[in-house]
Image (cartoon, rainbow, N blue to C red):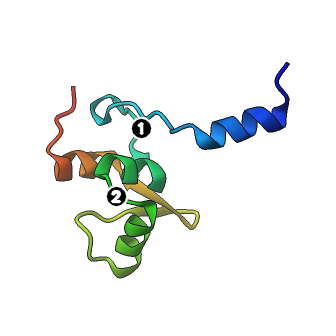
Amino acid sequence: METTLHSARRAATEPQQFPPLEHVTRPAVTTGEAAHYLNRKPQTLREWACTENGPLRPMRVNGRLAWPVAELRRVLGVTHQ
């Protein structure tokens, strides 16, 4: 039987799976998710948010960044199904 510690370690080393952007139905995604779709590191997106000079701007919700899915689709040229 696998312990919680072992499963947590395995989960931390496995890459995350994200649905295709055209299947995302939420209005906004986290910085990590947006970085995945934009093929950038999360810190790059945080820098864009601080300097306000990136291709899109996040919303701030209770001090956290939320990246609008519609803007991600626009920047990447992805159409919604």
Badge 2 density bin: few <14, some 14–19, many ≥20, Cα 10 Å: few
Q: Residue at x 82, y 24 (%)?
A: 2
8 versus 55 height, above or below = above
In the drawing, does residue 12 fall left or right of residue 30?
Answer: right
Taking depth in this image into account, of 20 and 9 the one nearest to the observer is 9
Q: Residue at x 27, y 63 (%)?
A: 56
Alpha-carbon span between mark 1 and mark 2: 21 Å
Residue 53 pos. (x, y %)? 26, 76
Q: Earlier in the sequence, mark 1 or mark 2?
A: 1
11 versus 61 height, above or below = above
In the drawing, does residue 66 fall left or right of residue 72?
Answer: right
Q: Which mark is residue 67?
A: none
Q: Which mark is residue 26?
A: 1
Q: Which residue reaches farthest top?
A: 1
Taking depth in this image into account, of 66 and 18 the one nearest to the observer is 18
In the drawing, does residue 31 fall left or right of residue 55?
Answer: right
Q: Residue at x 51, y 39 (%)?
A: 15
For disc 2, the marked residue is 40
What's under tag 1, amino acid-wise? Arg
Badge 1 density bin: few <14, some 14–19, many ≥20, Cα 10 Å: few
